[in-house]
Image (cartoon, grey):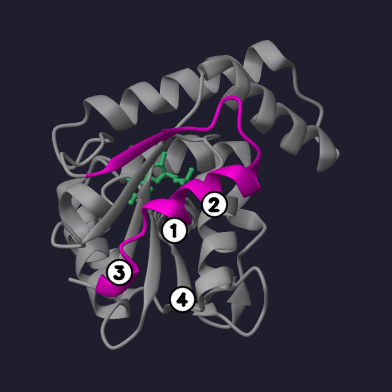
Amino acid sequence: MNNVITIDGPSGSGKSTISRLLAEKIGFLYLDTGAMYRAVALAASRKGVDLTDGKRLGELCRSLDLHFDIDESPARLFLGKEDISEAIRSPDMDMLSSKVSAVPEVREAMTGLQRKMAEGVKLVAEGRDMGTVVFSDAKNKFFITASAEIRSKRRYDERMSRGESVSLEGVTAKLCKRDHQDQTRSLAPLKPAQDAKVIDSTRLTLDEVVNKILDHLNLESV
Ligand code: DC
């Protein structure tokens, strides 16, 4: 598969901004699959769906009218006519999205949707299981890591800049808990694909990471 570049990694690794910058540079579309799991979590919590009820969550996923408006940069995510781009970024949705993403029916629905979104386009697909499961045939796979300290600090700065009142300790605890959940679930756990290039972004700027990816990209295959 040549039309998809996969970028996976834990929260706070910088992978979203890196994926967006990379996509802009090479003229690909950018797919934020974490936003899709967040949208499921938002819809489920609004409808009061029990997060352990796989059957109902599966039905909910199949009924969701979810689409990205890619004319905006960064793209906006809509649930029906509602722009939910901000609502999905709350601390509650951090944890709930991680929880719903472990449910098999949810993963099945999202995987199908993500593969459909990749049809006929060139895509930088970002998430946790892009290289291992959803686009396992992709020729260009990357896994972005960074130390837990720096990832927590980035998340903390992000929250503070949004005017939220948080402590670094609180942000660190939640980030570690979410990573643990994402890494230890039985289905599509967060891990690098065997053929992924792993890049540690702890001491690199976003641009330096993007340049490293560009150096490794097999451009003949995209
Ligand atoms: O990247 P993010 O923080 O917006 O993702 C939110 C949650 O969604 C994350 O904790 C795990 C889940 N997720 C996933 O299971 N698979 C993906 N491809 C992307 C995200």
Quadrant position of the C terminus in the picture: bottom left
User: Which one is closest to the eye, mark 4 or mark 2?
Assistant: 2
Query: Magenta residues?
Result: 196-222
Which residue lies at the image location 25% right of the left edge and 72% below the top edge?
221
Task: Indicate whether 165 appears above or below 113.
Answer: above
Residue carrying label 2:
210
Residue type marked 3: Val
* Count of marks overlaid on the render: 4
Dot 1: what SS? helix
Taking the image as shown, residue 209 lies to the left or right of residue 62, namely right
Q: Is residue 55 visible in this depiction of the protein? A: no
Which residue lies at the image location 18% right of the left edge and 47% below the top edge?
132
User: Which one is closest to the eye, mark 2 or mark 3?
Assistant: 2
Residue carrying label 3:
4
Q: In the rendered structure, find residue 28 and report the number of the disc placed on it.
A: 4
Alpha carbon separation for disc pair 2 and 1 = 39 Å
Mark 3 C-beta to ligand 1 under 8 Å: no
User: Which one is closest to the eye, mark 4 or mark 1?
Assistant: 4
Residue type marked 2: Val
Residue carrying label 1:
47
Task: Indicate whether 181 appears above or below 79.
Answer: above
Taking the image as shown, residue 129 lies to the left or right of residue 42, namely left
